[in-house]
Image (tube, rainbow, N blue to C red):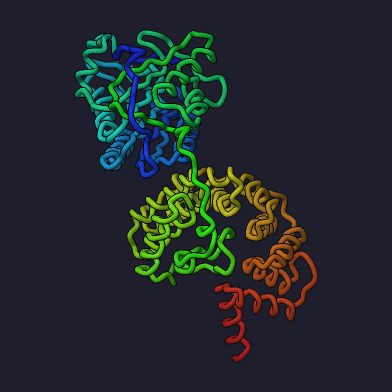
Amino acid sequence: MRRLFRSAIFTFTTGLLILSGDPAGAEERRVALVIGNANYASAPPLATSVNDAEDIAKVLTGLGFDIVLRRDTTAADLRSAIAEFSQKSTNADIAIVYYAGYSLNVGVGGYLVPTDARLLNSSDVRSETISLPEVMFGAGKARSLGLVVLDALRGNPFPVDTESLNIDSGADTASSRSGGARNVLLLFATEPRKISEQGHGRNSPLAAALLENLPKPGLEINFLLRNVRDHVRRSTHSRQTPYMYGQLSKQKIFIGTPKDAVATVPQDEAARAQPCDELAAAPDDTDLPPGIAGVAMEKIVAADAVTACTDSVNRFPTTSRFTYQLGRALFAAKDYDAALTNYRKAFDLGNIRALHTLGTLYDRGDGVERDPIRARLYYEIAAQKNFTPAMVNLATLYESGAGVAQDPAKAYALYQQAADLADAQAINKMGELTEKGHGVEQNPKSARALYEKSAGMGNPEAMVNLARCLANGIGGRKDIPEARKLLARAAKAGSTQARNIIAATTRRERK
């Protein structure tokens, strides 16, 4: 299917984006709204829109953006997402909107088309779609840059006759409708009245260009967008040229990392244990200084930990573990917004554990509204960096169908990836799926072998599973005394399930 870019808007001038000033600082706040509409109730489905949105969201998350990601949005969903994004943009330095889906150019402005739009007649346009100025208004609240990217399919498959609805063709009208939003740049897939191409692979030409160029360090926004334009022209053999319009401040703006933002090597003192480590380190953090065991969240003395970790962050601003631990301290103090901010900052400094922690918070709804889709996004990014707890949690989402289509086979494959990196929990989960025959051929003997391997690595859940196999002769010999020993080991290792089984067994034996 061909993409016909909206004919309404904006004159591109090559000299528009000549900027000067200082690069964005490390404390910069970034937010993004990413929409992918593919499955329409009254129009043909779009091949790449959801892929485009998911891939853009992953890249922006990796660049420190707080993402509002939505797929196949109805009008109510889209308005809700824009409202959430607009609220976040109020305190942001950079705000980006990426939209992939159908759009219309009707009357004096562009319109984003939700998946439940029917558009039977002209009166439906304003009630069933979202106007471009609404989106620009939210992005325009950012202090340094608002960027709106419309990777929109412009063919009109709906009954409404847009040609009879006063379609405008110039830049001036649309510009005036935007309210002259300061620091807002608009990027469209191709020039007015021109046809843009549907991607032949996973992504559209514009999305593919953005995915390649957004993460590149040292690309100021002017040069980044020029690279995107050139990339699209090359990939489409000059049949498509992205179209830009906007006004920016004189500040230099980098979406990726500025070339001169060189990370400072931590001082020797930062590598040694600090009071922040003693008060707020995570027990499962494998990168702690010697002698630090970590503190469970519920045992953190919040006031002391916040003070100590704030001091460490001030002294060692490029050492990610202190920023991460400050996030834990603030979470223990129930200052959830500040905790999330510091987890994101820690990830910006390279702390993958911080990103995984964000995923678990949204997965469980712990201190934030539960959002399995956002959790999945964070898990996927951390999993791509070989962080095995994220692989396990991502597999659990696929196993349960939370925020994603249930897929036991994919869950098993993810558990296998983590198991190959010696993750005991993943090996135990492989055993559970193998015992049930979910996503893999049922084999009690193989399941028991996996439980034995995981239990030997110290996993309490595997000890309980292996004890159950021994007690019932599943996958091998029956051995109740050995099962009792395993339950005792699991209970000692902290398994509540093992303690409950032991207590129930003791009560039965006393009767």
Q: Is residue 399 visible?
A: no
334 relative to 407, above or below = below
Q: Residue furthest front?
A: 268
| Residue 198 placement, left or right of 10 | right
Q: Is residue 193 visible?
A: yes
Say which of 122 and 420 sits in front: 420
Indicate the position of residue 359 as horizontal and vertical percent values.
47, 51
Say which of 109 and 468 sits in front: 109
417 relative to 484, above or below = above
Indicate the position of residue 102 as horizontal and vertical percent values.
38, 23
Numbered disc total: 0
Task: Give the residue at x 66% y 76%.
Answer: 489
Task: Give the residue at x 45% y 38%.
Answer: 261
| Residue 164 placement, left or right of 500 | left
| Residue 226 placement, left or right of 84 | right
The image quadrant that residue 170 belongs to is top left
Task: Name the quarter where the C terminus is drawn.
Answer: bottom right
Indicate the position of residue 448 as horizontal and vertical percent values.
74, 63
Q: Residue furthest bottom?
A: 510
Q: Residue furthest right?
A: 477
Task: Give the residue at x 53% y 9%.
Answer: 237
Indicate the position of residue 43 as horizontal and vertical percent values.
41, 22
